Amino acid sequence: MQHDFIQQKEQRCALQEDKQQFIEEIAALRSLAKLAEITGHLLEDLDDFKHDIERLDASSWERKQVQVLNRNTLERFSLAVLRAYRMQSS
């Protein structure tokens, strides 16, 4: 019984660490966008996305589908930042 408790605790810690790394990726992308002087809705949308992730509870984050959907969203934001940077540097 104690082994199960320890295993669950380790799994929750791993999930929390994974979620925290994801939040850090969003923050890093936002920083890059800001350095590239990208403003407006994109930064606001990144902030909203970060807050949404921060509010997810562990059971929601644990679901693989939630993680995949959020990873896809982060990829779309990354592409949007790259496109906006390319447009500004042209």
Image: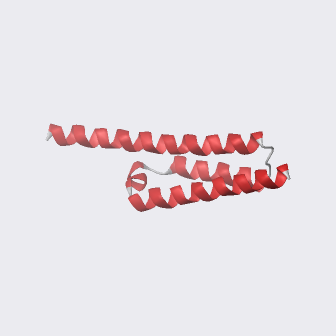
Give the quadrant of the N terminus: top left
Query: Looking at this rendering, what residue extends furthest in the left direction?
Result: 1
Q: Is residue 24 left or right of residue 3?
A: right
Q: Is residue 67 left or right of residue 9?
A: right
How far from the left and from the top, in percent, is residue 33?
A: 73, 45
Colouring rule applied to residues: secondary structure
Query: Looking at this rendering, what residue extends furthest in the front direction?
Result: 90
Residue 37 occupies quadrant: top right
Count the marks: how many?
Answer: 0
How far from the left and from the top, in percent, is residue 89?
A: 83, 49
Q: Is residue 8 left or right of residue 50?
A: left
- Residue at 44% of width from left, 50% of height from top? 57
- Residue at 19% of width from left, 43% of height from top? 4
How far from the left and from the top, in percent, is residue 20?
A: 49, 40
Height in image: 23 above or below 45?
A: above
Front one among 50 and 34: 34
Query: Looking at this rendering, what residue extends furthest in the right direction?
Result: 90
- Residue at 54% of width from left, 60% of height from top? 72
Front one among 14 and 9: 14
Front one among 38 and 41: 38
Q: Is residue 56 left or right of residue 40?
A: left
- Residue at 71% of width from left, 52% of height from top? 81
